[in-house]
Image: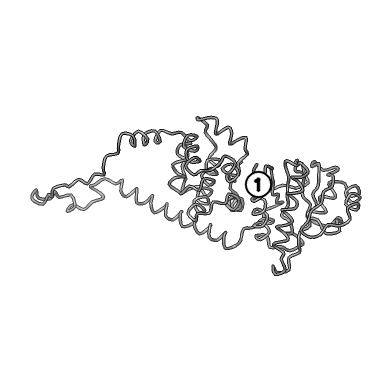
């Protein structure tokens, strides 16, 4: 099942478990921690945490959710940022790993995380985000669970400045290129009388005409021609399944790398006439590590195209040109630019 990044109040998430950004003594704190205690019922949750007593940094423990919509609260203790020189990143990664492992052992099917340690613990938001998506993504490539990364507002979510500027620069450059191409097409569509000087329209003397030499590629064999025609007429599902086979991939590898729900992928596989949403088609192109031409071809078979006027398409195009096929990094960027995510 996929990772979804959402803007919401984590205490309102209707999932099996929510994760509390806890302190080692499991006491009610401020920020996300305080909000979760208040929504669960501070007295009841405090008593449950007191029975556990302690949780070391990087680890996680579980209590009931009490008055929360979620059945459970997983209390994960993130590290305080001290400049990045004392293993804080590794501890934060362990925090996500241990919370997810605990959820798996408990039979939890859906879970919502805050961006742990990015509040009063001072972790740079871009670093906290990178760790969160990397560890959740690694987990989801091996396990089935619906995972939400919940951010309260845009200020709580931040790409690295270098990545943001690089993507914005690409979008701006492509916009200029598209404008220049449009002007060139308009010029080319002008009538010959207005677009060409008189001298250019004069026919050449017959004696200057040179014989034409044709250099044709060898004609394809009947079998090769038949295969070419079959492929040309393939629908989206047919082309998708052929690409999966050609790359020697399994179905789980594909839908996990595409951030797709297994049930949705099964619908696509079982229906040769299935027409996916554009973001689903793009997610599958990313999962198959297609280049831009291959991606455009797969999209065309679903009735779509990459548009130079679509910021979302340009962001995906940026990552394809970089040969970065990490669906979670792509979705980080799409979310940062307020665009729809790829996958489910």
Is 123 situated left or right of 319 in this image?
right
User: Camera-side residue: 147 or 187?
Assistant: 147
Q: Position of residue 330 (x, y in %)?
A: 57, 51
Q: Where residue 223 sits: x, y (%)?
A: 33, 34
Q: How many marks?
A: 1
In this rendering, is residue 309 above or below 235? below
The C terminus appears in which quarter of the rendering?
top right
Q: Nearer the viewer, residue 235 or 38?
A: 235
Residue at the far left: name it: 207
Q: Secondary structure at mark 1?
A: helix
Task: Write down the residue under mark 1.
Answer: 140
Left or right, 337 with respect to 232, comes to: right
The N terminus - image quarter: top right
Label 1 Cα crowd, 10 Å radius (few <14 / some 14-19 / many 20+): many
Is 64 positioned to the left or the right of 279 in the image? right
The x and y percentages for residue 179 are 41, 52
Which residue is depicted at the point 53% across and 54% down? 324
Q: Is residue 224 left or right of residue 101?
A: left
Give the residue drawn at x 9%, y 48%: 206
**As displayed, is residue 329 above or below residue 90?**
above
């Amino acid at each position: 099942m996929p990772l979804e990044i959402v803007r919401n109040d984590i205490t309102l998430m209707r999932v099996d478990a929510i994760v509390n950004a806890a302190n080692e003594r499991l006491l009610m704190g401020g920020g996300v921690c305080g909000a979760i205690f208040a929504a669960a019922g501070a007295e009841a949750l405090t008593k449950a945490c007191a029975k556990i007593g302690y949780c070391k940094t990087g680890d996680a423990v579980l209590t009931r959710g009490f008055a929360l919509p979620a059945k459970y609260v997983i209390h994960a203790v993130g590290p305080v940022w001290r400049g990045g020189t004392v293993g804080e990143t590794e501890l934060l990664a362990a925090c996500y790993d241990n919370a997810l492992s605990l959820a798996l052992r408990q039979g939890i099917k859906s879970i919502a995380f805050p961006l742990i340690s990015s509040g009063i613990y001072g972790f740079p938001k871009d670093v906290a985000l990178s760790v969160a998506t990397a560890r959740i993504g690694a987990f989801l490539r091996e396990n089935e669970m619906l995972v939400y990364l919940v951010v309260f507002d845009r200020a709580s979510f931040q790409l690295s400045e270098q990545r943001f500027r690089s993507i914005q620069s690409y979008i701006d450059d492509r916009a200029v290129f598209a404008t220049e191409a449009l002007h060139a097409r308009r010029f080319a569509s002008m009538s010959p009388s207005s677009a060409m000087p008189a001298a250019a329209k004069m026919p050449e003397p017959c004696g200057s005409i040179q014989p034409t030499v044709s250099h044709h590629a060898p004609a394809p064999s009947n079998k090769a021609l038949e295969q070419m025609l079959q492929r040309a007429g393939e629908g989206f599902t047919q082309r998708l399944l052929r690409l999966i086979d050609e790359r020697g991939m399994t179905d789980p590898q594909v839908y996990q790398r595409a951030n797709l729900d297994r049930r949705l992928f099964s619908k696509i596989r079982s229906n040769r006439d299935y027409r996916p949403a554009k973001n689903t088609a793009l997610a599958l192109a990313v999962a198959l590590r297609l280049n831009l031409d291959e991606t455009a071809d797969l999209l065309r078979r679903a009735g779509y195209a990459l548009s130079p006027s679509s910021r979302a398409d340009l962001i995906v195009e940026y990552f394809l040109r970089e040969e970065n096929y990490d669906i979670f990094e792509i979705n980080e960027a799409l979310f940062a630019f307020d665009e729809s995510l790829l996958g489910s």
